[in-house]
Structures are given as structure tokens and as C-alpha cells.
């Protein structure tokens, strides 16, 4: 027998043929993910969200400026395409590069538009929808740049639970939906604030989306909640309704007849029958076109008025109107205006008065104490002031975002007036040939925006303190435009009280 080495019993069952290695149990594959996959989902969601905002506001911008509207549509389609490319070509680098480049460029355009202003328009205020879209674009850029780094993209992370992912997606779309609702309702809600800080903006609250707001909600405001009934006449407070502002320029004809216009602007007690005035105008085509083209007034109805219930806003507007009245007191007659550097740009015209302009104020924007124009109730040196007019140079189709506190002062334009020797000779609808025949030339006027404030005792407008035309300014014969008593013939002067609704709740002016 051969000698064998004894083997000690182990007391354990025989070990299996394979070696047993003790190590941590790996996590199920379904619970792990690459960070690149999470970044992909984030960037896709941001691109889609920004695209929805741009799609929603494209129609509004098309109405204002075709180029801006097309730009919004192009950006929206580009962002939607990027989202598809990221989901489709998962191993390619170019979708990440495109997502970073396109969104960075769009965000840069937004920053420029809110600071220096893009070519053709002034800097715009910041609003929630555009800030949201830009925020999504910035996140998309950051996510794409991170995903382009292999060490980051391949890093293992816990896979997001589908429920949590769904909740996050619903939350994002809810925020996006809330931001585009005003546009889908027909409003342009760029930003809050009609005006800003500093001397060039007297007030705040003239919002792009809030110009007209929810008309039904505003109409349902209880009178006891309002603090703005002291800013207009009692007749206007009874007739005014909230809603859209009237036409902003005179490139379209009016929807009333010459006879209806005369019924408003011919004083039945003035000894001048309306029928005589109509016959006189019918025999003068240039004068008739000026009226029916909208150069004197766009409508024969009171301007809309959106109620104010915030006491702070009412106090601010009361202060501004008091300051405006003090400005008018400095120039009680045309002689005073001319001594201060104002010169005639229109003769007396029913509904809108005689305009005297100081061109040194033209580049200042809105400065309450320095109105570009003063309005008078006649043509002679003793004609009395009836109101102020602010003339803002502003490119684009959207009215300037500066002025008095609230949503009720609006700007209008006179596009293509016929000018002779620096004075308006005919309305905007006058042809180049007819204008030249009377020795004038057609002006552009597309960048000139004008607003009125009727702030003289005796000349309060029953169409609103900021109305585009004032029915108190009736037709006058050439012989009486220099001799009408002050205050639109009432004899009142600037030292008298305004006939605003003293029974209303709110500060008195």
C-alpha cells in the first residue's frame, strides 16, 4: 500500500465544484441609468415648452409686425425639430450641438430686446411668458453642453421613477399653459407696467395684456370697490364700459356718416344748423376726407375705461392728473405757449382742438411736466388751453409702454397727414397728388404716437379724460375761433375746479 496524507474532516458538506465568491449583490439594471438619458429628457422637455410659448404668441406678433410673427414661428418649429432630433438620433452629437446653439441664440436675442432693443423697436419690458421661454432655453443650453461631455453623459445615476417623471412633465406643461393662456384669449401679455422708474414714466400698470383685460370680469367690479370715479365726469362714468381701446391710427375709414358726426360736433344752440355744416363739408372733398378718414375722430362713442380698485394706483393717478393740470395752468393762452417755444401745427379742429408743439421736447419720451403739445379752443392769441398732448417717437405697431398710471390712457397715430408750411393742411387719406396740389407734402407718421389728457375746467370730455377726441370742441365758424370765452365757451379758467364726478369714491383733482 502506498502512503497517503491523512485528510482532516471539516465537518462541512462537500463544497461545489465552482469556487464561491462573496460580493455585493448588483442593483437590478432597470434601476440604473446614464446621466445623459436624464439630460436628454430634460432638454427635450425644455425645447417643447419653449416652442409652445412661441407658437402661442406668434399670431399676436403677426398682427403687430409680420417679421416678428414669422420669427416666432421659425423659432417654435426649430425648437420642436430639435426635440425630435434628440429623441430620434440618440447616439449622435449634432442634435446636442444644435440644441445648444439655437437656444443660446434665441435667448441672446431676448436679452438684447429687453435691454438695448432689437433694430426697429425700443427695449421691451420683461414679462412672465417671455421670461419662462428664455429660462427653458437657458436650461436646454446647459443640459446640452453637459451631455456633450462623455464623462458626464456616461455617469450612472438612479433611474427616475415613471410617476415622478410624469408629475414633473405635467408641472412643466401646467406652467407653460398658464403663460400662454392670455395669448389664446386674444391678449398680448408681454409684461406688467405702462412705464417704469424715473422721470420718463409717470406711472405704472399700463400692461400690454392688461390694456383691455377680461372685459366681463372688469364689468362685474362692484362700484363700491372702485376708487377711480373721481377722474371723469358723471356722464362718462355712467356710459363708459371696459374693453379694447379704439383704433390706434387713421389708416382705416370710420363707421359713421357725416350727418352723425355733425350731430355730435355741431352745437344746436350755436346758431349753425347741422345740415348747413354737412353741405359746407360735402363741397370740400379735402375736408370731408379728413373727417371720414378718421383724422379728427375714429369713433363717436366714449372711450373704454377699465375700473381701478387699488387705492395706491388711484392715489398715483390723482397726483399725476393734478400735476398735468398745473402744467396747463402755466400756458393759459396761445400767446403763453408761443412765448415758451410752442408753435402751431394745426388750426382749431372740432373734436381735437388746435395743436401747438414744442419740438425741443420731442426726444424726451414721456415726461409729464414737458408735454410735446398743448391744445387750445381757438386760433387767436387769446384762445384758451383745453388739454395736453404727449407725442412719443416709437417704432413698431404696438403703442408705447409709458404714460399715466393705469390701463386707460392710449396712444394713436396720424399716418400720412398732408403738411404745408409745418401745419396740417389735410388728413391722412389725402392722396399724394391732392396734397401736392394744395402746396403740401405727405408725412410718414408711423413712428409718431399721440395721447391726450383733457384737463381744463369747462372742457372736460364726456368721452373720458384720455379720450382721442372731445365732444366739447364743437364746430366754429372762422370768425369765432378767436373770441370764444375760455373753458370751451363756459367762461371757466384754470383756477376753477374740474367738473369730475365729485360723488364718486376717489381722490379729487
Image (cartoon, rainbow, N blue to C red):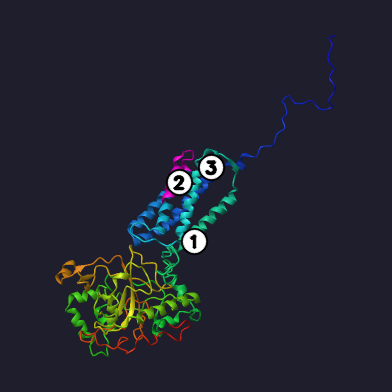
User: Left of 416 or right of it: where is 303?
Assistant: right
Label 2 crowd (10 A; few <14 / some 14-19 / many >=20): many
- Above or below, 469 against 267 in this view is above
- Above or below, 153 against 281 in this view is above
Q: Quadrant of residue 362?
A: bottom left
Q: Position of residue 162 (x, y in %)?
A: 58, 49
Residue 176 in view here: yes
In-front residue for pair 347/474:
347
The kind of secondary structure element at disc 2 is: helix
Q: Over which residues does the magenta segment extend?
A: 87-105
Residue position for label 2: 100
The quadrant the C terminus occupies is bottom left
Residue position for label 3: 36
Choose the circle earlier in sequence order: 2 or 1. 2
Label 1 crowd (10 A; few <14 / some 14-19 / many >=20): few
Residue 412 in view here: no
Residue position for label 1: 178
The residue that appears at 32% across and 90% down in the rendered structure is: 491
Q: Main secondary structure of the magenta part?
A: helix
- Above or below, 434 against 267 in this view is above
**Residue 288 covered by magenta stretch:** no
In-front residue for pair 165/500:
500
In space, the residues marked 3 and 1 are separated at their CA atoms by: 30 Å
Front disc: 2 or 1: 2
Q: Position of residue 182 (x, y in %)?
A: 45, 64
The kind of secondary structure element at disc 1 is: helix
The kind of secondary structure element at disc 3 is: helix
Q: Residue furthest front?
A: 339
In space, the residues marked 2 and 1 are separated at their CA atoms by: 26 Å
Q: Position of residue 48 (x, y in %)?
A: 47, 51
Choose the circle earlier in sequence order: 2 or 3. 3
In space, the residues marked 2 and 3 are separated at their CA atoms by: 15 Å
Amino acid at each position: 500500500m502506498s502512503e497517503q496524507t491523512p485528510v482532516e474532516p471539516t465537518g462541512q458538506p462537500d463544497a461545489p465544484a465552482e469556487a464561491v465568491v462573496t460580493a455585493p449583490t448588483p442593483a437590478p439594471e432597470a434601476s440604473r441609468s446614464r446621466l445623459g438619458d436624464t439630460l436628454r429628457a430634460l432638454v427635450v422637455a425644455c425645447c417643447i415648452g419653449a416652442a409652445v410659448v412661441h407658437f402661442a404668441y406668434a399670431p399676436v406678433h403677426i398682427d403687430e409686425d409680420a417679421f416678428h410673427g414669422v420669427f416666432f414661428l421659425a423659432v417654435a418649429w426649430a425648437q420642436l425639430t430639435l426635440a425630435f432630433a434628440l429623441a430620434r438620433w440618440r447616439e449622435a452629437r449634432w442634435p446636442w450641438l444644435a440644441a445648444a446653439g439655437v437656444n443660446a441664440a434665441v435667448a441672446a436675442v431676448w436679452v438684447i430686446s429687453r435691454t438695448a432693443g432689437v433694430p426697429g423697436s425700443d427695449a421691451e419690458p420683461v414679462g412672465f411668458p417671455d421670461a419662462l421661454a428664455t429660462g427653458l432655453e437657458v436650461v436646454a443650453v446647459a443640459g446640452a453642453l453637459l451631455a456633450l461631455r462623455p464623462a458626464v453623459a456616461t455617469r450612472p445615476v438612479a433611474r427616475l421613477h415613471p410617476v415622478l417623471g410624469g408629475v414633473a412633465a405635467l408641472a412643466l406643461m401646467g406652467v407653460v399653459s398658464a403663460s400662454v393662456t392670455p395669448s389664446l384669449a386674444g391678449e398680448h401679455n408681454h409684461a406688467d407696467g405702462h412705464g417704469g422708474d424715473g422721470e420718463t414714466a409717470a406711472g405704472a400698470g399700463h400692461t400690454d395684456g392688461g390694456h383691455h383685460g377680461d372685459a366681463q370680469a372688469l364689468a362685474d367690479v362692484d362700484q363700491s370697490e372702485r376708487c377711480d370715479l373721481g377722474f371723469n365726469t358723471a356722464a362718462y362714468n355712467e356710459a363708459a364700459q371696459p374693453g379694447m381701446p379704439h383704433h390706434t391710427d387713421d389708416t382705416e375709414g370710420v363707421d359713421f356718416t357725416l350727418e352723425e358726426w355733425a350731430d355730435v360736433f355741431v352745437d344746436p344752440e350755436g346758431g349753425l344748423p347741422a345740415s348747413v355744416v354737412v353741405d359746407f363739408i360735402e363741397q370740400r372733398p379735402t375736408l370731408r376726407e379728413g373727417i371720414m378718414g378718421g383724422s379728427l375722430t375714429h369713433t363717436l362713442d366714449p372711450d373704454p375705461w377699465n375700473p381701478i380698485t387699488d387705492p395706491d394706483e388711484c392715489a398715483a393717478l390723482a397726483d399725476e392728473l393734478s400735476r398735468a393740470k398745473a402744467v396747463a395752468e402755466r400756458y393759459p393762452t396761445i400767446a403763453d405757449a408761443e412765448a415758451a417755444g410752442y408753435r402751431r401745427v394745426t388750426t382749431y379742429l372740432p373734436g381735437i382742438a388746435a395743436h401747438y408743439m414744442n419740438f425741443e421736447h420731442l426726444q424726451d419720451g414721456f415726461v409729464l411736466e414737458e408735454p410735446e403739445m398743448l391744445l387750445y379752443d381757438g386760433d387767436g392769441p387769446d384762445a384758451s388751453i383745453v388739454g395736453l398732448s404727449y407725442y412719443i417717437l416709437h417704432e413698431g405697431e404696438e403703442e408705447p409702454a409709458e404714460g399715466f398710471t393705469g390701463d386707460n390712457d392710449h396712444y394713436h397715430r396720424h399716418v400720412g397727414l398732408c403738411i404745408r408750411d409745418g401745419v396740417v393742411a389735410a388728413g391722412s387719406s389725402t392722396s399724394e397728388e391732392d396734397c401736392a396740389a394744395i402746396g403740401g407734402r405727405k408725412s410718414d407718421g408711423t413712428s409718431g404716437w399721440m395721447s391726450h389728457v383733457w384737463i381744463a375746467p369747462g372742457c372736460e370730455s364726456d368721452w373720458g379724460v384720455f379720450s382721442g377726441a372731445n365732444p366739447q370742441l364743437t364746430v366754429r365758424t372762422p370768425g369765432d375761433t378767436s373770441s370764444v370765452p375760455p373753458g370751451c365757451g363756459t367762461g371757466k379758467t384754470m383756477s376753477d375746479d374740474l367738473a369730475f364726478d365729485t360723488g364718486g369714491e376717489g381722490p379729487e383733482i
